[in-house]
């Protein structure tokens, strides 16, 4: 091919790519959420979906499909089998969703190959929450001896292999305690069972318990972050509570099937990050206990890549099972 023809072909491709981006979306977009209704993931999806419709002129329809490791088995399977055209998207947990993808895992797909990150949506520190009637501790220093005195004590999380599960396993590893994981299909069922007395302790994201901070059946003892949350400044960090090293940031983001055209990914990234920066929507998100965290595609990919070794190291050293 001559230089002139090559140049013309490149120009044509660029024009086609631009048109594809401008034409998208031309029909309703399906957003599959990996957790049940009522939790942080679902709430953020329902804050963003009508705003996306306003910006694009097409409906963004939220569909809850909980189950599996942070959505890997159910929601993720649906999206990875969909056409890579930008009309089926996934909202799922971030780093934990990609972590623990070890050889031999019985997973229906490879999230590193079969999904493409679009943007991080929000972050929220994980918290340790107890039912005070079952574990009468007012601080982490009081809680740890109670846990060690009850070998096999159950702890709940939002799902096997979820970020909440990882946070619980990290806590268990650091305090060298015998605890039994009880997985739920999302944080809301875990918190409901905690309040109902079915489990004494749970690891969830702060956004899932923000509305229960004054509930007598719920006691949030610490946030797993290096600094106190602006959404709950009265809750101490784990370092302040005598357990440095227990740091686990909850996050979830937006994904598309692998192979989705880059112009579509960039259009989605531009629209969603603009909404996350919009003051009125940011205020609504902050009220849920989450913090908007818009990122470029490349930035979010690096965010995930940096988290994977940390959690895979925990899996190796602790011997924890995340399936």
Image (cartoon, helix red, strand yellow):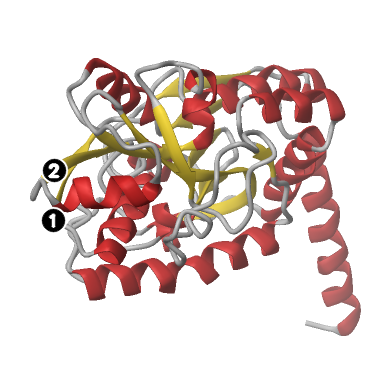
- For mark 1, what is the residue? 178
Q: Position of residue 254 (x, y in %)?
A: 58, 42
Q: Position of residue 151 (x, y in %)?
A: 8, 50
- Judge by depth and name the residue closer to the eye, 257 or 38: 38
Q: Is residue 210 left or right of residue 38?
A: right
Q: Quick check: 232 above or below 297?
A: above
Q: Quick check: 262 above or below 234?
A: below
Camera sees residue 161:
no
- Judge by depth and name the residue closer to the eye, 28 or 20: 28
- Judge by depth and name the residue closer to the eye, 141 or 215: 141
Which image quarter is the N terminus in?
A: bottom right
Mark 1 lies on a secondary structure that is: loop
Image point 58% across, 50% down: which residue?
260
Q: Which mark is residue 39?
A: none
Q: Quick check: 236 above or below 52?
A: below
Q: Which mark is residue 153?
A: 2
Q: Position of residue 15 (x, y in %)?
A: 86, 53
The furthest residue to the left: 151
Q: CA distance from mark 2 to mark 1?
A: 7 Å
């Amino acid at each position: 091919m001559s230089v002139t023809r090559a140049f013309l072909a490149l120009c044509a491709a660029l024009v086609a790519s631009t048109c594809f981006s401008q034409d998208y979306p031309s029909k309703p977009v399906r957003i599959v959420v990996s957790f049940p209704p009522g939790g942080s993931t679902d709430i953020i999806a329902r804050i963003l979906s009508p705003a996306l419709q306003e910006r694009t002129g097409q409906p963004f329809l939220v569909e809850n499909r909980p189950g599996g490791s942070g959505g890997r088995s159910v929601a993720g399977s649906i999206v990875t089998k969909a056409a890579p055209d930008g009309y089926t998207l996934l909202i799922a947990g971030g780093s934990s969703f990609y972590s623990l993808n070890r050889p031999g895992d019985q997973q229906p797909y490879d999230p590193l190959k079969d999904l493409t990150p679009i943007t991080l949506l929000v972050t929220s520190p994980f918290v340790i929450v107890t039912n005070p009637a079952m574990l009468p501790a007012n601080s982490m220093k009081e809680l740890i001896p109670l846990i060690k005195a009850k070998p096999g004590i159950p702890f709940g999380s939002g799902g096997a292999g979820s970020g909440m599960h990882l946070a619980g396993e990290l806590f268990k590893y650091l305090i060298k305690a015998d605890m039994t994981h009880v997985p739920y299909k999302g944080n809301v069922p875990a918190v409901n069972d905690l309040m109902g007395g079915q489990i004494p302790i749970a690891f969830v994201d702060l956004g899932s318990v923000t509305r229960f901070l004054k509930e007598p059946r719920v006691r949030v003892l610490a946030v797993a972050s290096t600094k106190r949350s602006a959404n709950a400044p009265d809750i101490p960090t784990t370092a302040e509570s005598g357990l440095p090293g227990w740091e686990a940031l909850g996050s979830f983001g937006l994904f598309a099937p692998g192979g989705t055209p880059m112009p579509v990914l960039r259009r989605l990234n531009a629209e969603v990050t603009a909404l996350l920066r919009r003051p009125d929507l940011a205020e609504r998100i902050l009220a849920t206990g989450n913090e908007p965290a818009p990122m470029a595609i490349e930035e979010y990919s690096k965010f995930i890549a940096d988290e994977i070794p940390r959690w895979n190291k925990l899996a190796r050293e602790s011997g924890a099972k995340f399936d």
